[in-house]
């Protein structure tokens, strides 16, 4: 039951993340509501995984565990920055609260943290993508997945990652992440389908990178253990 709740929260967070990135489609008010929902779900996600924090200083750190820990902590920092800056910048949901802050700093923080958060959360999802694949395998009625289907899925994954890399470069995301450009110029004439397709493929790129990074590190670890 707890696993199903976790999976449901993660699914909702993934959907909200895409909606949050599509600001030119949703507008300011919906963006704030989606952001508030994301923050609440993120807090629930952390409460349900509270044991992870207790194990931080226990056990041996492999390269894979160190990378996972770094990504998780980075996601936490980006979400805290987004939560604070989002409340300060709010024009609707939190506008009536006696919360003040430096608007210029909050705007810059929100810009950088939103794109870093998008990349880091996508990598985090990629690190756990094997669980998603395992769920699909359990739902798949056949005992063995046909090789043709497996290679078809791999081809689609490569295509999505490739197009995501193109969109990532085209949208100049790196300049926002490192604040080389401090203002985002949204194309409000772009169709909703095009906007969401772009962000889905960009997410797919980082999920792809995260998933195969984990696979590669596990393979290296298993080979080193065999040599020992």
Image (cartoon, rainbow, N blue to C red):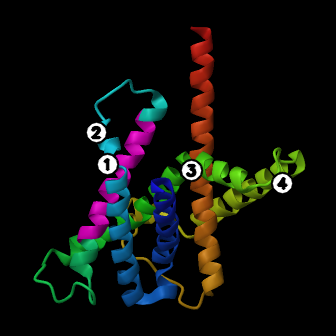
Q: Is residue 209 in view from this perspective?
A: no
Question: In the picture, residue 199 is in which quadrant?
Answer: bottom right
Q: Nearer the viewer, mark 2 or mark 3?
A: 2
Q: Residue at x 58, y 53 (%)?
A: 207
Q: Position of residue 84 (x, y in %)?
A: 23, 69
Distance from disc 2 to disc 3, alpha carbons, whole Å, reads 23 Å
Q: Are marks 1 and 2 in contact (CB under 8 Å)?
A: yes
Mark 4 is surrounded, within 10 Å at the Cα level, by few (under 14), some (14 to 19) or many (20 or more) other residues, namely: few
Q: Using the image, determine if residue 14 lies above or below residue 57.
A: below
Residue 168 visible here: yes
Badge 4 is on which residue? 152
- Which numbered disc, 4 or 1, marks the residue closer to the eye? 1
Front label number (2 vs 4) = 2
Compare residues 206 and 56 and report the one nearer the observer.
Answer: 56
The image position of residue 44, as x and y in percent, is 34, 62
Q: Secondary structure at mark 4?
A: helix
| Mark 2: few/some/many CA within 10 Å (<14, 14-19, 20+) | few
Whether residue 81 is in magenta: the answer is yes
Q: Is residue 219 left or right of residue 181?
A: right
SS under mark 1: helix
Residue corresponding to mark 3? 126
Can you identify the residue that label 1 sits on?
Answer: 50
Q: Secondary structure at mark 2?
A: helix
Task: List x then y, in percent, for residue 37.
Answer: 37, 75
* Alpha-carbon span between mark 1 and mark 2: 7 Å
Q: Residues within 10 Å of mark 3 (few under 14, many from 20)?
A: many
Q: CA distance from mark 1 to mark 3?
A: 21 Å
Q: Which residues are magenta?
A: 66-84
Disc 2 target residue: 54
Which badge, 2 or 3, comes first in the chain's sequence? 2
């Amino acid at each position: 039951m707890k696993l199903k709740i976790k999976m449901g929260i993660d699914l909702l967070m993934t959907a909200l993340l895409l909606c949050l990135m599509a600001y030119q489609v949703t507008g300011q008010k919906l963006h704030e509501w989606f952001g508030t929902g994301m923050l609440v779900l993120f807090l629930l996600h952390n409460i349900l995984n509270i044991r992870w924090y207790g194990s931080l200083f226990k056990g041996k750190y492999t390269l894979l565990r160190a990378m996972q820990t770094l990504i998780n902590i980075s996601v936490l920092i980006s979400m805290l920055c987004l939560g604070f800056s989002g409340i300060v910048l709010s024009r609707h949901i939190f506008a009536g609260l006696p919360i003040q802050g430096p608007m210029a700093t909050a705007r810059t923080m929100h810009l950088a943290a939103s794109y870093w958060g998008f990349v880091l959360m996508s990598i985090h999802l990629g690190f756990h993508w094997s669980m998603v694949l395992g769920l699909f395998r359990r739902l798949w009625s056949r005992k063995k997945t046909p090789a043709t289907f497996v290679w078809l899925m791999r081809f689609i994954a490569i295509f999505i990652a490739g197009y995501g890399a193109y969109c990532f470069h085209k949208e100049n995301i790196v300049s926002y992440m490192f604040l080389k450009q401090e203002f985002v110029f949204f194309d409000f004439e772009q169709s909703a389908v095009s906007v969401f397709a772009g962000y889905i493929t960009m997410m797919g790129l980082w999920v792809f990178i995260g998933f195969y990074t984990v696979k590669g590190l596990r393979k290296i670890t298993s080979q080193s253990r065999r040599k020992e």
